[in-house]
Amino acid sequence: MGAGMAKAIRAHFPEAYEADLATPCGARNKLGTISVARCHRGDAELWVVNAYTQFHYRGSGVRVDYPAVASAMEQVKRQFSGKRIGYPRIGAGLARGDWTKLAALIDAALDGEDHTLVELPAAAS
C-alpha cells in the first residue's frame, strides 16, 4: 500500500493497512481475494476492502490480473450484498489495466447491487 490509490487509502484509513498487514506478505494465493477493515469516522461506520488484484508491481505492461478483479468483486458482493458499494478505478492506474474491461467485470460481479465508481480529484490522491 505504498503507491497510487492504495497509498491514499492507507493514509485515510490506517485500519485497512492493518488488515492488509494481517495477511501473508507477497503470497500469490492472495490474488483474487479480499481483506476488510471496519472503520468509524464520527458517527459513520464503513468497511474498507483491500482487493488483491495484481501480483507484480514492477515492470512494463499490464499488471492487473483481470480474473482476480472479478473474483475479488464477487467476494465483495457475497460479503456486502444489500449495502452501498463504492470503488475507485481499481486496476486502471498503476496496474495499467483497461478501465472499460475492468468496469464490465465489476458490473457483472456486482450485478443487482447498489454500486458506484468513486473518483477523487487528482490532488486528493
Image: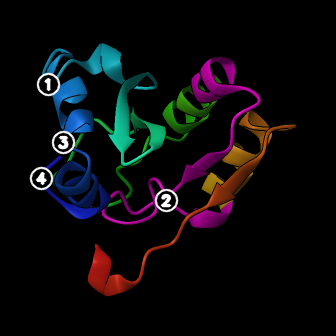
Label placed on residue 2: 4
Q: Where is residue 110 in the image (x, y as percent from the top left)?
A: 74, 37
SS at mark 2 in the image:
loop
Tell me what residue is drawn at x 18 percent, y 42 percent. Answer: 14
Report the Cα–Cα distance between label 3 and label 1: 11 Å
* 92 within the magenta span: yes
Name the kind of residue labelled 4 in the image: Gly
Location of residue 108 (image quadrant): top right
SS at mark 4 in the image:
loop
Q: Position of residue 46 (x, y in %)?
A: 47, 39
Q: Name the residue under label 2.
A: 88
Q: What's drawn in magenta, residue-wise?
A: 75-100
Location of residue 118 (image quadrant): bottom right
Name the kind of residue labelled 2 in the image: Pro
Name the kind of residue labelled 3 in the image: Pro
Q: Position of residue 50 (x, y in %)?
A: 37, 35
Which tag, 2 or 3, sits closer to the chain's start? 3
Which tag, 4 or 3, sits closer to the chain's start? 4
Which tag, 1 or 2, sits closer to the chain's start? 1
Label placed on residue 14: 3
59 or 119: which is nearer to us?
119
Q: Where is residue 100 in the image (x, y as percent from the top left)?
A: 67, 65
**In this rendering, does residue 18 appear at all?**
yes
Report the Cα–Cα distance between label 2 and label 3: 17 Å
